[in-house]
Image (cartoon, helix red, strand yellow):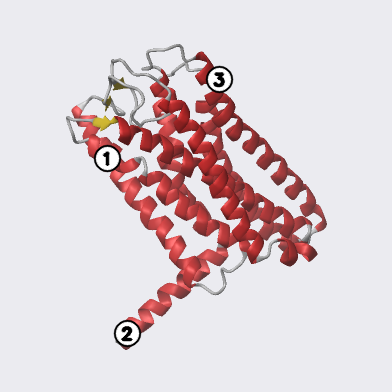
Amino acid sequence: MQQNKTVTEFILLGLTQDPVRQKMVFLIFLIFYTATVVGNLLIIVIIQVSRTLGSPMYFFLFHLSFTDTCFSTSIAPKLIIDSLSENRVISYNECMTQVFALHLFGSMEIFVLIFMAVDRYVAICKPLRYPTIMRRQVCIILIIVAWIGSFIHSTSQILLALKLPFCGPNLIDHYCCDLQPLLKLACVDTYIINLLFVFNSGALCSSSFLLLMISYFVILHSLRNHSAEGRKKALSTCTSHIIVVILMLVPCIFIYTRPSVSFPVDKMVTVFYTIGTPFLNPLIYTLRNAEVKNAMRKLWSVKITSKSKW
């Protein structure tokens, strides 16, 4: 990471420069981040200990919650600390690491959402072949493929970032390091790099969103042939997935599929998919999922029973 370089560190301007609003940012995002970590870890623990949540859907939900925790952790702690600090410096190496982590866990989340859609498609449209197609070994291979694909994507992004020369200024008008705000600071024509950036991240978000929407349209269309009870259960599950897909990918498309032109709303849109979506996912998958809620009740009742015996 020593290719660029007269600039050795950057200064993150954050979400606001107002001292009162900075304290509000600290409090709000501390609550959001704490709830994100606790909620996602709770889902991870429940899936691990519950015998009723052993289906492929919960295998993928386990990895989605793990990815959400890592995704939020790559961004939120720095934002929280900087909101109470006058020194918002981030070193060049730390900035590049954040770019890599942001795209690694962000793309991993997208891949997991795709595999969750595949799981629902097979379960609803090809129920007789479901145990054969979505067996444990296949799910593990899919997750390995997702990590490999995410690593390739994030590596391509970091290679673009490492090629950028920074001569000053070093003020990043954002709360985190990403390729788009870094392009504005590069002392070189970034037209080609920006096209590669849009082609890579923008194409990933757009094509994934289109593929997922088509998949769920096919799934919902096929529900006509199911019983009323089967339709209700499948519709509840698919609705949760569709909500998560929209919350994650629509902001990504807004940020990554346009030329390097910034809008005042960009930072808030980025907050939505880097911090808001990981926070909302546990709520969506627990409040709308009867099996997860039942597993939580059983876990809680076992805990209370063991305490009373003690």
Q: Name the residue under label 2.
A: 308
Give the quarter of the figure containing the N terminus: top left
Comes first in the chain, label 1 or label 3? 1
Q: Name the residue under label 3.
A: 195
Left or right relative to 226: residue 91: left
Q: Where is residue 301, by image quadrant?
A: bottom left
- Mark 2 vs mark 3, CA separation in Å: 63 Å
Contact? badges 2 and 3 (CB < 8 Å): no
**What amino acid is found at the position of numbered circle 2 in the picture?**
Ser
Give the quarter of the figure containing the C terminus: bottom left
Which residue is farthest left?
A: 86
Residue at x-position 54% and y-position 40%: 152
Residue at x-position 42% and y-position 79%: 302
Relative to 19, does residue 242 appear above or below in the rendering? below
Residue 66 is situated, as x and y percent measured from the top left of the image, at 45, 55
Q: Mark 1 points at which residue?
A: 80
State whether residue 282 appears in this view: no
Mark 1 or 2: in front is 1
The crowd level at tag 2 (other Cα within 10 Å; few <14, some 14-19, many 20+) is few
Residue at x-position 57% and y-position 48%: 146
Residue 304 is situated, as x and y percent measured from the top left of the image, at 36, 78
